[in-house]
Amino acid sequence: MKIRKYVARSMPEALQQVREDLGEHAVILNTRQIRKNTRFNPQGEARVEVTAALDEAGAAAPAPAPAAAVPLDWSYAPPSLRGASLAPAPAEVPALPAARALAPASPPAAAPAPPARGPFEGSEQILRQLRQLQDSVERLERRAPAALVFPKTLGRLVDRLRSTGLVEDLVHRIAQQLFLEQSGVSPEREDREALNQRAAALLAATLPPCRDIRIGRGRKVVGFVGASGAGKTTAAAKIAAGFAMRRKQGIVLISTDDRRVGALDQTRIFAQLIGVELEVAYREEDLRAALDRHPDARLVLIDTAGCGPHERREWEKRRQLLETAGADEVQLVIDTMNGYEHMLDLLEASQALPERRLLFTKLDEAVRPGALLSAAAKSQLPTSYFSVGPSVPGAIEAGDLRKLAARVTGAAAEKGK
Protein backbone atom coordinates (compact mmCIF):
# COMPACT_ATOMS: atom_id res chain seq x y z
CA MET A 1 0.00 0.00 0.00
CA LYS A 2 1.27 3.47 -0.88
CA ILE A 3 0.62 6.31 1.59
CA ARG A 4 1.62 9.82 0.53
CA LYS A 5 1.01 13.43 1.51
CA TYR A 6 0.21 16.27 -0.87
CA VAL A 7 0.36 20.00 -0.12
CA ALA A 8 -1.44 22.49 -2.35
CA ARG A 9 -2.99 25.94 -2.26
CA SER A 10 -6.56 24.61 -2.41
CA MET A 11 -8.48 21.38 -1.97
CA PRO A 12 -9.27 20.90 -5.71
CA GLU A 13 -5.58 21.32 -6.53
CA ALA A 14 -4.60 18.77 -3.87
CA LEU A 15 -7.19 16.25 -5.11
CA GLN A 16 -5.92 16.72 -8.65
CA GLN A 17 -2.40 15.88 -7.44
CA VAL A 18 -3.72 12.75 -5.76
CA ARG A 19 -5.46 11.57 -8.92
CA GLU A 20 -2.47 12.28 -11.13
CA ASP A 21 -0.10 10.44 -8.81
CA LEU A 22 -2.15 7.56 -7.39
CA GLY A 23 -5.04 7.33 -9.83
CA GLU A 24 -8.78 7.02 -9.42
CA HIS A 25 -8.57 4.22 -6.82
CA ALA A 26 -6.81 6.36 -4.20
CA VAL A 27 -8.45 6.74 -0.78
CA ILE A 28 -8.25 9.99 1.19
CA LEU A 29 -7.10 9.29 4.77
CA ASN A 30 -6.88 12.79 6.25
CA THR A 31 -6.95 16.49 5.42
CA ARG A 32 -5.86 19.55 7.36
CA GLN A 33 -5.29 23.26 6.93
CA ILE A 34 -1.74 24.60 7.43
CA ARG A 35 -1.95 28.06 8.95
CA LYS A 36 0.00 31.05 7.72
CA ASN A 37 3.37 31.99 9.24
CA THR A 38 4.00 28.88 11.33
CA ARG A 39 7.15 26.84 11.75
CA PHE A 40 5.54 24.20 9.49
CA ASN A 41 4.72 26.77 6.80
CA PRO A 42 7.47 29.45 6.68
CA GLN A 43 6.40 30.61 3.20
CA GLY A 44 3.52 32.53 4.78
CA GLU A 45 0.72 31.23 2.54
CA ALA A 46 -2.21 29.09 3.61
CA ARG A 47 -1.91 25.50 2.46
CA VAL A 48 -4.02 22.34 2.37
CA GLU A 49 -2.44 19.00 3.22
CA VAL A 50 -4.08 15.76 2.02
CA THR A 51 -2.94 12.28 3.06
CA ALA A 52 -3.93 9.61 0.53
CA ALA A 53 -3.34 5.88 0.15
CA LEU A 54 -3.48 3.39 -2.70
CA ASP A 55 -3.97 -0.35 -2.25
CA GLU A 56 -1.85 -1.59 -5.14
CA ALA A 57 -3.33 -5.07 -4.97
CA GLY A 58 -6.87 -3.74 -5.16
CA ALA A 59 -5.99 -1.23 -7.81
CA ALA A 60 -4.47 -3.95 -10.01
CA ALA A 61 -7.73 -5.93 -10.04
CA PRO A 62 -9.60 -5.69 -13.34
CA ALA A 63 -12.30 -3.08 -13.28
CA PRO A 64 -15.82 -3.82 -14.58
CA ALA A 65 -16.59 -2.78 -18.10
CA PRO A 66 -17.60 0.86 -18.19
CA ALA A 67 -20.94 2.05 -19.42
CA ALA A 68 -21.30 3.81 -22.73
CA ALA A 69 -19.06 6.84 -22.71
CA VAL A 70 -20.75 10.19 -22.68
CA PRO A 71 -18.95 13.46 -23.45
CA LEU A 72 -18.48 15.78 -20.49
CA ASP A 73 -20.62 18.88 -20.35
CA TRP A 74 -18.39 21.85 -19.42
CA SER A 75 -21.00 24.54 -20.00
CA TYR A 76 -21.39 25.37 -16.31
CA ALA A 77 -17.75 25.04 -15.25
CA PRO A 78 -15.70 28.19 -14.58
CA PRO A 79 -13.45 29.22 -17.48
CA SER A 80 -10.31 28.35 -15.49
CA LEU A 81 -11.39 24.71 -15.21
CA ARG A 82 -12.96 24.12 -18.61
CA GLY A 83 -11.14 21.42 -20.41
CA ALA A 84 -9.69 19.89 -17.20
CA SER A 85 -10.26 16.21 -16.61
CA LEU A 86 -11.14 14.58 -13.30
CA ALA A 87 -11.46 11.09 -14.80
CA PRO A 88 -10.02 9.12 -17.72
CA ALA A 89 -11.03 10.64 -21.03
CA PRO A 90 -14.15 8.95 -22.47
CA ALA A 91 -14.21 7.44 -25.90
CA GLU A 92 -15.11 9.74 -28.72
CA VAL A 93 -18.82 9.90 -29.50
CA PRO A 94 -20.21 11.33 -32.70
CA ALA A 95 -21.77 14.73 -32.27
CA LEU A 96 -25.53 14.75 -31.97
CA PRO A 97 -27.47 16.46 -34.72
CA ALA A 98 -28.66 19.96 -34.11
CA ALA A 99 -32.35 18.90 -34.29
CA ARG A 100 -34.15 15.59 -34.41
CA ALA A 101 -37.53 14.80 -35.94
CA LEU A 102 -40.20 13.46 -33.66
CA ALA A 103 -40.60 9.70 -33.98
CA PRO A 104 -43.63 7.56 -33.15
CA ALA A 105 -43.69 6.34 -29.59
CA SER A 106 -42.17 2.90 -29.17
CA PRO A 107 -41.82 0.66 -26.12
CA PRO A 108 -38.60 1.23 -24.21
CA ALA A 109 -36.00 -1.31 -25.17
CA ALA A 110 -33.34 -0.50 -22.57
CA ALA A 111 -32.61 1.76 -19.63
CA PRO A 112 -31.68 5.33 -20.61
CA ALA A 113 -28.03 6.29 -20.59
CA PRO A 114 -26.83 8.18 -17.50
CA PRO A 115 -26.79 11.97 -17.81
CA ALA A 116 -23.60 13.79 -18.62
CA ARG A 117 -21.36 14.26 -15.60
CA GLY A 118 -19.75 17.62 -14.94
CA PRO A 119 -16.31 18.19 -13.45
CA PHE A 120 -17.64 18.91 -9.95
CA GLU A 121 -20.24 16.15 -9.78
CA GLY A 122 -19.49 13.94 -6.80
CA SER A 123 -17.48 16.59 -4.95
CA GLU A 124 -20.07 16.73 -2.18
CA GLN A 125 -19.73 13.00 -1.70
CA ILE A 126 -15.93 13.32 -1.52
CA LEU A 127 -16.17 16.07 1.10
CA ARG A 128 -18.66 14.00 3.08
CA GLN A 129 -16.27 11.06 3.04
CA LEU A 130 -13.41 13.33 4.11
CA ARG A 131 -15.44 14.56 7.07
CA GLN A 132 -16.33 10.99 8.04
CA LEU A 133 -12.67 9.94 7.86
CA GLN A 134 -11.61 12.96 9.88
CA ASP A 135 -14.19 12.16 12.57
CA SER A 136 -12.96 8.56 12.64
CA VAL A 137 -9.35 9.67 13.13
CA GLU A 138 -10.36 11.99 15.98
CA ARG A 139 -12.30 9.19 17.64
CA LEU A 140 -9.28 6.90 17.38
CA GLU A 141 -7.06 9.56 18.95
CA ARG A 142 -9.46 9.89 21.85
CA ARG A 143 -10.08 6.19 22.24
CA ALA A 144 -7.23 5.45 24.67
CA PRO A 145 -8.24 7.95 27.39
CA ALA A 146 -11.95 7.45 26.76
CA ALA A 147 -11.68 3.69 27.18
CA LEU A 148 -10.71 4.10 30.85
CA VAL A 149 -13.51 4.64 33.33
CA PHE A 150 -11.75 6.32 36.23
CA PRO A 151 -12.83 5.94 39.83
CA LYS A 152 -14.36 9.02 41.35
CA THR A 153 -11.28 10.30 43.18
CA LEU A 154 -8.94 9.66 40.25
CA GLY A 155 -11.40 11.27 37.84
CA ARG A 156 -11.39 14.45 39.90
CA LEU A 157 -7.60 14.47 39.91
CA VAL A 158 -7.52 14.09 36.11
CA ASP A 159 -9.92 17.02 35.75
CA ARG A 160 -7.72 19.09 38.05
CA LEU A 161 -4.60 18.36 35.99
CA ARG A 162 -6.35 19.39 32.78
CA SER A 163 -7.64 22.59 34.36
CA THR A 164 -4.08 23.66 35.25
CA GLY A 165 -2.99 23.64 31.59
CA LEU A 166 -1.00 20.41 31.67
CA VAL A 167 -0.82 18.96 28.16
CA GLU A 168 -2.93 15.89 27.41
CA ASP A 169 0.07 13.65 26.86
CA LEU A 170 1.28 14.14 30.43
CA VAL A 171 -2.25 13.88 31.82
CA HIS A 172 -2.81 10.56 30.03
CA ARG A 173 0.51 9.07 31.16
CA ILE A 174 -0.07 9.99 34.80
CA ALA A 175 -3.74 8.93 34.76
CA GLN A 176 -3.06 5.57 33.14
CA GLN A 177 -0.27 4.76 35.60
CA LEU A 178 -2.46 5.71 38.56
CA PHE A 179 -5.34 3.71 37.08
CA LEU A 180 -3.17 0.61 36.90
CA GLU A 181 -1.93 1.11 40.44
CA GLN A 182 -5.45 1.72 41.75
CA SER A 183 -7.06 -1.26 40.00
CA GLY A 184 -8.80 -3.47 42.53
CA VAL A 185 -9.06 -0.73 45.16
CA SER A 186 -12.64 -0.20 46.28
CA PRO A 187 -14.03 3.36 46.29
CA GLU A 188 -14.40 3.20 50.08
CA ARG A 189 -10.65 2.64 50.47
CA GLU A 190 -9.47 5.35 48.07
CA ASP A 191 -6.95 7.69 49.70
CA ARG A 192 -7.07 11.12 48.05
CA GLU A 193 -3.95 12.39 49.80
CA ALA A 194 -1.88 9.36 48.81
CA LEU A 195 -3.21 9.61 45.24
CA ASN A 196 -2.20 13.26 44.95
CA GLN A 197 1.24 12.53 46.37
CA ARG A 198 1.74 9.73 43.87
CA ALA A 199 0.59 11.96 40.99
CA ALA A 200 3.08 14.63 42.09
CA ALA A 201 5.87 12.05 42.10
CA LEU A 202 4.97 10.79 38.62
CA LEU A 203 4.84 14.34 37.27
CA ALA A 204 8.13 15.31 38.95
CA ALA A 205 9.82 12.30 37.34
CA THR A 206 9.22 13.85 33.90
CA LEU A 207 10.71 17.26 34.80
CA PRO A 208 14.31 18.53 34.41
CA PRO A 209 16.45 19.53 37.42
CA CYS A 210 16.97 23.01 38.85
CA ARG A 211 20.35 24.69 38.28
CA ASP A 212 20.64 28.25 39.56
CA ILE A 213 23.61 30.52 38.91
CA ARG A 214 26.78 29.55 40.75
CA ILE A 215 29.96 31.64 40.85
CA GLY A 216 33.31 29.87 40.86
CA ARG A 217 36.84 31.21 41.02
CA GLY A 218 36.76 32.76 37.55
CA ARG A 219 34.44 35.29 35.97
CA LYS A 220 30.99 34.09 34.95
CA VAL A 221 29.05 35.71 32.08
CA VAL A 222 25.30 35.13 31.88
CA GLY A 223 23.02 36.35 29.10
CA PHE A 224 19.27 37.02 29.32
CA VAL A 225 17.12 36.51 26.20
CA GLY A 226 13.40 36.25 25.50
CA ALA A 227 10.37 37.96 24.04
CA SER A 228 9.54 41.60 24.67
CA GLY A 229 7.80 42.19 27.97
CA ALA A 230 8.82 38.83 29.45
CA GLY A 231 10.66 40.52 32.34
CA LYS A 232 14.31 40.03 31.37
CA THR A 233 15.56 43.33 32.82
CA THR A 234 13.71 42.84 36.10
CA ALA A 235 14.91 39.23 36.41
CA ALA A 236 18.53 40.25 35.76
CA ALA A 237 18.23 43.02 38.37
CA LYS A 238 16.76 40.58 40.93
CA ILE A 239 19.65 38.16 40.43
CA ALA A 240 22.23 40.97 40.52
CA ALA A 241 20.70 42.26 43.77
CA GLY A 242 20.84 38.82 45.36
CA PHE A 243 24.55 38.42 44.65
CA ALA A 244 25.34 42.06 45.48
CA MET A 245 23.86 41.68 48.96
CA ARG A 246 26.40 38.96 49.70
CA ARG A 247 29.46 40.17 47.78
CA LYS A 248 29.04 43.96 47.71
CA GLN A 249 31.27 44.16 44.63
CA GLY A 250 32.30 42.32 41.50
CA ILE A 251 28.81 42.40 39.93
CA VAL A 252 28.38 44.14 36.55
CA LEU A 253 25.11 44.67 34.67
CA ILE A 254 25.39 45.35 30.91
CA SER A 255 22.43 46.66 28.91
CA THR A 256 22.34 45.98 25.16
CA ASP A 257 18.65 46.79 24.63
CA ASP A 258 18.41 49.31 21.78
CA ARG A 259 14.82 48.49 20.79
CA ARG A 260 12.60 49.27 23.78
CA VAL A 261 11.88 52.88 24.69
CA GLY A 262 13.02 53.60 28.23
CA ALA A 263 14.98 50.37 28.58
CA LEU A 264 18.22 52.11 29.57
CA ASP A 265 16.47 54.34 32.12
CA GLN A 266 14.89 51.33 33.79
CA THR A 267 18.21 49.46 33.93
CA ARG A 268 20.00 52.53 35.33
CA ILE A 269 17.43 52.86 38.11
CA PHE A 270 17.84 49.18 39.03
CA ALA A 271 21.64 49.48 39.03
CA GLN A 272 21.53 52.50 41.34
CA LEU A 273 19.00 50.79 43.62
CA ILE A 274 21.04 47.63 44.14
CA GLY A 275 24.46 49.29 43.92
CA VAL A 276 26.10 47.51 40.98
CA GLU A 277 28.13 48.73 38.02
CA LEU A 278 26.22 49.48 34.82
CA GLU A 279 27.61 49.41 31.28
CA VAL A 280 25.87 50.11 27.96
CA ALA A 281 26.91 48.23 24.84
CA TYR A 282 24.90 48.23 21.61
CA ARG A 283 27.65 46.79 19.39
CA GLU A 284 30.05 43.91 19.71
CA GLU A 285 33.09 46.20 20.01
CA ASP A 286 31.32 48.15 22.78
CA LEU A 287 30.68 44.89 24.61
CA ARG A 288 34.33 43.86 24.40
CA ALA A 289 35.40 47.25 25.74
CA ALA A 290 32.91 47.02 28.62
CA LEU A 291 34.23 43.61 29.63
CA ASP A 292 37.82 44.86 29.43
CA ARG A 293 36.99 47.68 31.85
CA HIS A 294 36.00 45.15 34.52
CA PRO A 295 38.65 42.42 34.49
CA ASP A 296 38.01 41.57 38.16
CA ALA A 297 34.24 41.18 37.86
CA ARG A 298 33.00 37.85 39.21
CA LEU A 299 29.54 37.97 37.66
CA VAL A 300 28.51 39.77 34.45
CA LEU A 301 24.81 39.85 33.55
CA ILE A 302 23.98 40.87 29.96
CA ASP A 303 20.43 42.09 29.35
CA THR A 304 19.48 41.84 25.65
CA ALA A 305 16.62 43.36 23.67
CA GLY A 306 13.43 41.34 23.38
CA CYS A 307 12.52 39.60 20.14
CA GLY A 308 9.66 37.40 18.98
CA PRO A 309 10.09 33.69 18.30
CA HIS A 310 9.88 34.20 14.52
CA GLU A 311 12.49 36.98 14.27
CA ARG A 312 15.29 34.72 13.11
CA ARG A 313 17.73 37.52 12.30
CA GLU A 314 17.32 39.02 15.74
CA TRP A 315 17.98 35.67 17.39
CA GLU A 316 21.12 35.31 15.32
CA LYS A 317 22.25 38.76 16.52
CA ARG A 318 21.71 37.64 20.13
CA ARG A 319 23.81 34.53 19.48
CA GLN A 320 26.67 36.52 17.97
CA LEU A 321 26.56 39.09 20.78
CA LEU A 322 26.67 36.47 23.53
CA GLU A 323 29.37 34.55 21.69
CA THR A 324 31.47 37.72 21.60
CA ALA A 325 30.98 38.13 25.34
CA GLY A 326 31.97 34.51 25.97
CA ALA A 327 28.70 33.74 27.77
CA ASP A 328 28.91 30.69 30.03
CA GLU A 329 25.14 30.20 30.10
CA VAL A 330 21.99 31.83 28.76
CA GLN A 331 18.80 32.40 30.69
CA LEU A 332 15.77 31.96 28.41
CA VAL A 333 13.21 34.19 30.13
CA ILE A 334 9.63 32.99 29.59
CA ASP A 335 6.47 34.75 30.73
CA THR A 336 4.24 32.13 32.39
CA MET A 337 1.17 34.07 31.27
CA ASN A 338 1.88 32.83 27.73
CA GLY A 339 0.54 29.57 26.36
CA TYR A 340 2.28 26.25 25.81
CA GLU A 341 2.64 26.70 22.03
CA HIS A 342 4.30 30.10 22.45
CA MET A 343 6.77 28.58 24.91
CA LEU A 344 7.62 25.86 22.39
CA ASP A 345 8.21 28.51 19.73
CA LEU A 346 10.68 30.31 22.00
CA LEU A 347 12.47 27.07 22.77
CA GLU A 348 12.80 26.34 19.08
CA ALA A 349 14.00 29.86 18.23
CA SER A 350 16.74 29.76 20.90
CA GLN A 351 18.21 26.38 19.96
CA ALA A 352 21.51 27.87 18.75
CA LEU A 353 22.26 29.56 22.09
CA PRO A 354 24.76 27.88 24.44
CA GLU A 355 23.94 26.30 27.80
CA ARG A 356 20.31 27.41 28.05
CA ARG A 357 18.42 27.62 31.34
CA LEU A 358 14.71 28.29 31.77
CA LEU A 359 13.76 31.30 33.89
CA PHE A 360 9.99 31.67 34.32
CA THR A 361 8.59 35.07 35.28
CA LYS A 362 5.26 36.28 36.71
CA LEU A 363 4.56 32.93 38.34
CA ASP A 364 2.47 34.75 40.94
CA GLU A 365 0.09 35.81 38.14
CA ALA A 366 -0.07 32.48 36.28
CA VAL A 367 -3.59 31.05 36.02
CA ARG A 368 -2.56 27.77 34.33
CA PRO A 369 0.95 26.89 35.54
CA GLY A 370 0.70 23.44 33.97
CA ALA A 371 1.79 25.02 30.68
CA LEU A 372 5.27 25.81 31.99
CA LEU A 373 5.58 22.31 33.46
CA SER A 374 4.66 20.88 30.07
CA ALA A 375 7.20 23.08 28.27
CA ALA A 376 9.94 22.17 30.75
CA ALA A 377 9.16 18.46 30.42
CA LYS A 378 9.18 18.76 26.63
CA SER A 379 12.53 20.60 26.45
CA GLN A 380 14.30 18.88 29.39
CA LEU A 381 16.31 22.09 29.87
CA PRO A 382 17.25 22.84 33.49
CA THR A 383 15.33 25.60 35.23
CA SER A 384 17.10 28.34 37.15
CA TYR A 385 14.64 30.70 38.85
CA PHE A 386 11.00 31.65 39.28
CA SER A 387 10.14 35.34 39.41
CA VAL A 388 7.18 35.67 41.78
CA GLY A 389 6.65 39.43 41.89
CA PRO A 390 7.86 42.83 40.62
CA SER A 391 9.93 43.80 43.68
CA VAL A 392 13.64 44.52 43.29
CA PRO A 393 15.42 43.20 45.26
CA GLY A 394 13.51 40.06 46.22
CA ALA A 395 10.50 38.19 44.77
CA ILE A 396 12.67 35.52 43.14
CA GLU A 397 13.25 31.90 44.12
CA ALA A 398 14.97 28.78 42.85
CA GLY A 399 13.12 27.18 39.96
CA ASP A 400 12.32 23.88 41.68
CA LEU A 401 9.70 22.29 39.45
CA ARG A 402 8.95 19.56 41.99
CA LYS A 403 7.32 22.08 44.33
CA LEU A 404 5.19 23.37 41.48
CA ALA A 405 4.24 19.80 40.53
CA ALA A 406 3.05 19.21 44.10
CA ARG A 407 0.98 22.39 43.94
CA VAL A 408 -0.57 21.51 40.58
CA THR A 409 -1.59 18.01 41.67
CA GLY A 410 -2.91 19.20 45.03
CA ALA A 411 -0.27 17.32 47.00
CA ALA A 412 1.12 20.51 48.55
CA ALA A 413 -2.31 21.56 49.83
CA GLU A 414 -2.96 18.12 51.29
CA LYS A 415 0.44 18.04 52.95
CA GLY A 416 -0.11 21.41 54.54
CA LYS A 417 -3.30 20.34 56.30
Image (cartoon, grey):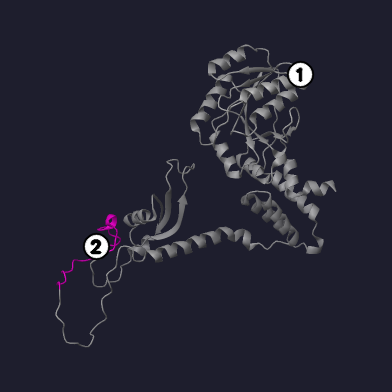
Label 1, on which residue? 247
Kind of residue at badge 1:
Arg
* Residue closest to the eye, 5 or 417: 417
Residue 181, image x, y percentages: 73, 56
* Residue closest to the eye, 55 or 407: 407
| Mark 2 crowdedness (10 Å alpha carbons): few <14, some 14-19, many ≥20 | few
State whether residue 328 appears in this view: no
Q: Residue at x 61, y 12 (%)?
A: 292
Label 2, on which residue? 89
| Mark 1 crowdedness (10 Å alpha carbons): few <14, some 14-19, many ≥20 | few
State whether residue 287 appears in this view: yes
Q: Is residue 84 magenta?
A: yes
Q: Which residues are magenta?
A: 76-98
Q: Residue at x 50, y 33 (%)?
A: 311
* Residue furthest right as drawn: 417
Question: Is 328 left, or right, of 106 in this rendering?
Answer: right
Question: Is 154 left, or right, of 134 in this rendering?
Answer: right
Please identify the quarter of the rendering in which residue 327 is found: top right
Residue 282, image x, y percentages: 55, 20
Q: Regarding mark 2 in the picture, which secondary structure is present there?
A: loop
Helix, strand or loop for the magenta stretch, by majority: loop
* Residue closest to the eye, 5 or 229: 229
